[in-house]
Image: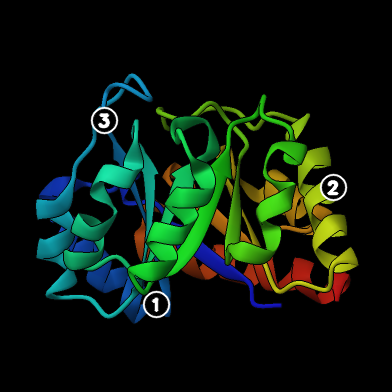
Amino acid sequence: MEYQLCPSILSADFNRLGEQIQTLEKEGVKWLHIDVMDGDFVPSISFGMPVIRSIRKESKMFFDVHLMVSAPERYIQDFVDCGADSITVHAEACEDLERAVELIRDAGVKVGISIKPATPVNDISHLLEDVDMVLVMTVQPGFGGQKYIDDCTEKIRELRELIEKEELNTDIQVDGGINDSTMETVIRAGANLLVAGSYVFNGDLASNVNRINRKMQEIINTVE
């Protein structure tokens, strides 16, 4: 199983976004988490295709695009065209989740589905073999800096058990409230892709990445 730190540019300094992305790449970060919010599915509004298209020109990182938007099926091809390597849609935002998964797959990128803290794993368990990743929101989507919701740990564990039982290679990503303490919690529960915003970007970026990666590896060594 591959573990990755996935810094969320939602917490970046947009006046220095290009510079900060270069720092992440220099420090060996392979995944960039890109939260797109529409002010409808979630209250906040973030950014869209122009920003992704702009940073795509200067980065070779894996662009992990998380669509927190209503009816995301409308935009899948647009986000692929501007540089997404994977697209994650919310189960709660799709009229026809199976169709959305199919559209992403047909567009030639990795497929992710996400569930809010209150959404049970059972709602998406039938699609585990059809997706590359399940993103478990461990805070309410739409705002940074929230505290990790402890009840989500059991959902991560339940997902990992289902994936292993079905002998799948599906990744489990978590997003929300990741820090030194919760990182160990989610990795031990079965997550392997960790989205982090303020945890990465607050303070010295390069030092934070190095410290977090060392901490992750220490935990992984005790799990494997």
**Classed neighbour count for the residue bearing mark 3: other residues with Cα under 10 Å, few (<14), some (14–19), many (≥20):** some
Kind of residue at badge 3: Asp
What's the CA distance linking mark 1 and mark 3? Answer: 31 Å
Along the polypeptide, which appears first: circle 2 or circle 1? 1
Dot 1: element: loop
The answer to whether residue 4 is seen in the rendering is yes
Instruction: Locate residue 82, reporting x and y percent.
Output: 16, 64
| Amino acid on which disc 1 is placed | Glu
Give the residue number, with chain letter if any, for mark 2.
158
User: Does residue 140 sit above or below 187 in this rendering?
Assistant: above
- The residue that appears at 55% across and 44% down in the rendered structure is 114
Q: Secondary structure at mark 2?
A: helix
- Circle 2: residue type: Glu
Q: Which residue sits at x=37%, y=25%?
A: 41
Bin the neighbour count of mark 2 within 10 Å (Cα to Cα): few under 14, some 14-19, many 20 and up: some
Residue 91, labelled with which disc? Answer: none
Q: Position of residue 113 (x, y in %)?
A: 54, 50
Residue hosting label 3 = 38
